Amino acid sequence: MADTDEFWTAEEVSNYLRIPQSTIYKLAQDKVLPGFKVGKHWRFRREAILKWIDDSENKKSTPTSGNLK
């Protein structure tokens, strides 16, 4: 039996990230946020959202390469 929290709605992702639901739809449509449509409804795998957050944080914290003396 699947975990009932495995998939989130756009509203649940919006609440979790504390950003407007319209932004969730825009990011999903632009393939920035990992999600998929079931009919007219967007669904987001919880683990994919958490990984996306981690990946986004890691991109910002990765130092740029340069000459260090």
Image: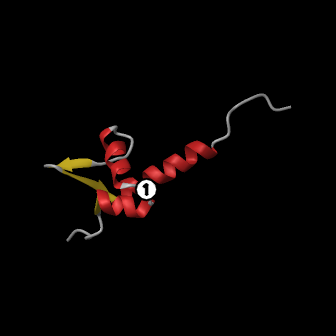
Furthest residue in direction left, as rendered: 39
> Split into 4 quadrants, where in the image is the N terminus?
bottom left
Q: Using the rendered view, name the quadrant where residue 11 is placed.
A: bottom left
Find numbered disc 1 in the image and state the secondary structure of the residue it sits on: loop
Please, which colouring scheme is shown? secondary structure
- For the image, the number of numbered tags is 1
Residue at x-position 63% and y-position 46% = 61
Rendered view: 31 above or below 51: above
**50 in relation to 69, above or below:** below
Q: Is residue 49 left or right of residue 57?
A: left
Residue ID at (30%, 56%) = 10
As displayed, is residue 62 above or below residue 69?
below
Q: Amino acid at mark 1?
A: Ile
Quarter that holds the C terminus: top right
The residue pinned by badge 1 equals 19
Residue 28 in picture, x, y percent from top left: 32, 44
Q: Is residue 62 left or right of residue 37?
A: right
> How far across and how far down the image is residue 18, in percent?
44, 60
Residue 67 position, x and y percent, is 78, 28
Q: Position of residue 60 (x, y in %)?
A: 59, 44
Residue beneath the point at 34% across and 47% down: 34
Instruction: From the viewer's perspective, tell me whether residue 62 is left or right of residue 33.
Output: right
